[in-house]
Image (tube, rainbow, N blue to C red):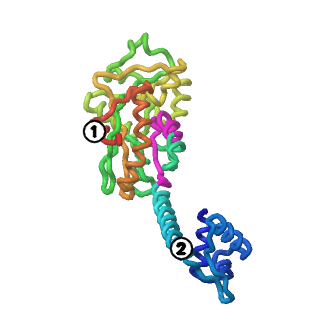
Amino acid sequence: MNLRQLTYFAAIARLGSQTEASQMLNVSQPALGVQIRALEDELGLRLFTRRSRGMELTEAGTRLLRHADLILKQLAEAKSDMAAFSKRAGLRLTLGVAPTPGKAIMPKFLAACREDATLSVAVREGLSTDLIAQVTKGNLDLALCYDPSLLPNTTVIPLFHEDLVLVHPNELESRFGGEIAFRDLAGLPLILDGPGQITRQLIDRLAQSCGVALNVTMEIEATSLKWDFMRSQGWYSIVPYGLFKDETVDGNFAWARIVDPPITRTLCLLTGAALSDRDLQAFCRVLCPVLQDRIDHGGLHWRWTEGANNLMI
């Protein structure tokens, strides 16, 4: 006995005609007849009495119809329940990501999404200022960006802190001993982001509060162009370590910590008004293990913020 046989049996029983059941089910009459005979042979019972005006249920057929109705009803409910679950499982989000987390997190995060199969994420890279604007306009569901202001209809969730470092294409250890005081940045030719970008604004505010006049030789936001000009001109830049980690490990660039004071920024998860709590939880369920691994083992000098553990669901 199988579901196909029960479906055919119930249709004939309701309509009282194999011809009408064949038309309703879009199945040939011989195919219906084969399935009904196989069901009767398996049960060792006659389920219908064949008459000239149609097919009538026997007493055994009437009893089986009760079971068939219950089974087919439960099957329909199961399909409906799974369809609703499938809609939840097929979550699609658009995520904006700043260059550093894009490089350090996204490969493992997207691999985790593929394995999870309940979350599909379209990723767009951009600088934090631009990502924040796209979230507020509703063009992105959420963004991994730095130090966003709390704007109407958005939520800001701080994730981790990172200190910016000084990077140069030559050896820095012999000159600065692996770290440099913020005030000593004043004498260095620097390549920084434009003044409209959040990280540049953070550096400028700190310089102003410390009374340090920085020598900004050039403003470049594209990372690859920064690399090229630093190599060709021997200039410096203030960047997150994670953005230049591979280059420093390969020996192409050297870096030094900035101290007294450090330049610290915070990566946040910025969400728009349209993102539901359930969808946020589904996103964080995939993101947080990846983030935990990168903080613990990535060598990126990231530190969890207070309260970030609330996302570990």
In the displayed structure image, the side of residue 93 where residue 262 appears, left or right: left
- The residue carrying mark 2 is 65
Identified at 44% across, 20% down, the residue is: 255
Pointer 2 or 1: first along the chain: 2
Direction top: furthest residue: 174
Q: CA distance from mark 2 to mark 1?
A: 58 Å
Q: Give the answer, above or below, for where 42 lies relative to 21.
A: above
Direction right: furthest residue: 30
In the displayed structure image, the side of residue 277 where residue 50 appears, left or right: right
Rendered-image quadrant of the C terminus: top left
Which SS class for mark 1? loop
> Which x, y percent locates residue 165?
40, 25
State yes or no: residue 51 in magenta: no
Give the magenta part as a residue range.
89-111
Camera-side residue: 87 or 310? 87
> Looking at numbered disc 1 in the image, what kind of residue is underneath it?
Gly
Direction bottom: furthest residue: 53
- The residue carrying mark 1 is 307
> Which x, y percent locates residue 203?
34, 33
